[in-house]
Image (cartoon, helix red, strand yellow):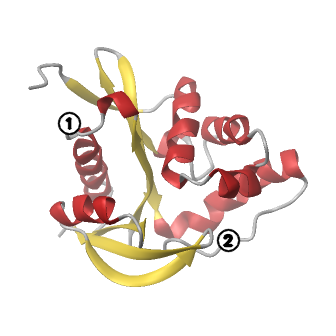
Amino acid sequence: MNTKTLIIRVAKPHDAPLIAQVVAMAIGDELSLKNYCGEHYLKVLEEIAQNEKTQYSFKNTLIAEIENVPIGAVIGYDGAKLFELRDYTFSIINKHLNKIPNMTAETQAGEFYLDSIAILSNYRGQGFGKDLISALCQKALVEGHENVGLLVDFENQKAENLYSTLGFKRINETEFLGHKMWHLQKKLK
């Protein structure tokens, strides 16, 4: 049994290296990461995380900590702001790669989008991911959203099962970064 207290807090700019790592872990496909952000994708993602106006910004991130040690994070934002956030995200990528990624929209107006979540490997399987998702849903509710949405790979049944236990249901399927995905959504009200 885990007796250490989990703290979930709003991210700060100095959390950018962890946020970059979480985004990379959530995407999980190094080829996609290199296509999206280049060979030094962690450095690019770190710069994106330090910017207040990007989709992976520290402003959109909650950090999980145990005894002042960050163990994971969740990133989420208003789906209606995707293209505005992407403009800033893509401008940073363009600065490094001299190209702008071509991506389909992974969210939409009418939902708060859970973009990325990951727990560092030493802390997995202890319910901390559920705690982060619950905290993000609470944040969305406080900000006036009625739905939280996310994408999960068709092949990732374990993750889909986790989301199902938290009240997420399939609403459609899509393709994102070359993978078939389920678009799941949870009603908050």
Q: Which one is nearer the viewer's eye here, 141 or 20?
A: 20
Marks 1,2: beta carbons within 8 A: no
Does 40 appear above or below 28? above
Q: Which residue, given by chain and number where applicable, does mark 1 sit on?
A: 126
Residue at the (47%, 46%) spot, across then down: 60
Q: Name the residue type under label 2.
A: Met
Mark 1 Cα within 10 Å, few/some/many (few <14, many 20+)?
few
For the view shown, which residue lies furthest in the top direction?
A: 67
Q: Residue at x 41, y 73 (%)?
A: 154
Task: Give, as a three-letter code, the residue at label 1.
Answer: Gln
Question: Regarding mark 2 in the picture, which secondary structure is present there?
Answer: loop
Looking at this view, is 11 or 64 the one in front?
A: 64
Report which residue position mark 2 lands on: 103
Res. 110 visible in picture:
no
Q: Measuring 18% from the left and 66% from the top, which residue is drawn there?
A: 167
Q: Nearer the viewer, mark 1 or mark 2?
A: 1
